[in-house]
Image (spheres, rainbow, N blue to C red):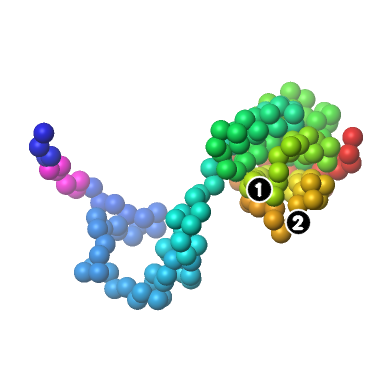
């Protein structure tokens, strides 16, 4: 079977800013200062990766976004994923948790546990990570205004497991834009969260 030459695409490609994008960049058409523009892997300006050996030294973290109804149900799913080779966790919180409401708040009606796990208290976070060694697994949490509270719950669970805080790994991002569009939520004021007691 012969490889056939494709006809060149005559459309003009450009960046969002309207700058033209060439088909190929090489030393022949780009002036590059190695130190300033590229640098070594693991060094500023990080164009070649943030670690010197990148994924040769440590494979990337594999996560599946997961969260189901109750903390116990999500814990079961987390454990299943870890048993089957996942190397990190990515927690999907339900809409009331993302918006800073407890599950029993009137505005939570019909939304509790629908699109993620409900976490109203430290006790919920303890059930969520029961039997999961937080010192050995990286956990991602992308949340809205209650990010600081949920991170504090997570740190408390790590403390209870005897994991030094500097060994807890994973991103915890307070970003309302992630939830606003795909999950039809608006922004949340930080003062709305009130479920920090263990029940």
Tell me the residue that label 2 is attached to.
Answer: 164
Check the image and report above or below for 149 versus 98. Answer: below
Q: Which residues are magenta?
A: 5-10
SS for callout 1: loop
Q: Quadrant of residue 130?
A: top right
Check the image and report above or below for 67 versus 155. Answer: above
**Quadrant that contains the N terminus:** top left
Query: How far across and down, in percent of the image, does residue 183 sit?
Result: 61, 34
Q: In the rendered structure, does residue 7 fall within the stretch colored magenta?
A: yes
Q: In the rendered structure, does residue 103 fall within the stretch colored magenta?
A: no
Residue plotted at (78% across, 39% down): 125
The secondary structure that dominates the magenta segment is: loop
Residue 150 falls left or right of residue 199: left
Residue 29 falls left or right of residue 89: left
Query: How far across and down, in percent of the image, does residue 149 sit?
Result: 79, 48
- Callout 2: 10 Å neighbours few (<14), some, many (20+)? few
Mark with earlier residue (2, 1): 1
Determine the CA span between mark 2 and mark 1.
11 Å
Residue 136 is labelled as: 1
Evaluate whether residue 163 shows in this view: yes
């Amino acid at each position: 079977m012969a490889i056939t030459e494709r006809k060149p695409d005559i459309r003009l490609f450009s960046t969002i800013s309207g700058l033209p994008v060439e088909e190929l960049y090489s030393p022949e058409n780009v002036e590059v200062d190695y130190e300033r523009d590229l640098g070594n892997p693991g060094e500023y300006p990080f164009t070649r990766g943030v670690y010197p050996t990148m994924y040769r030294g440590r494979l990337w973290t594999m996560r599946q976004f997961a969260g189901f109804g109750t903390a116990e149900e999500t814990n079961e799913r987390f454990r299943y994923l870890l048993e089957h080779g996942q190397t990190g966790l990515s927690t999907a919180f339900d809409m009331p948790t993302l918006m800073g409401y407890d599950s029993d708040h009137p505005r939570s009606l019909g939304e509790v546990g629908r699109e993620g796990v409900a976490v109203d208290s430290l006790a919920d976070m303890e059930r969520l990570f029961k039997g999961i060694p937080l010192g050995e697994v990286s956990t991602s949490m992308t949340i809205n205004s209650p990010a600081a509270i949920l991170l504090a719950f997570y740190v408390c669970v790590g403390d209870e497991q005897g994991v030094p805080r500097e060994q807890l790994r994973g991103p915890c991002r307070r970003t309302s834009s992630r939830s606003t569009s795909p999950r039809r939520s608006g922004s949340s004021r930080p003062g709305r969260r009130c479920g920090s007691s263990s029940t």
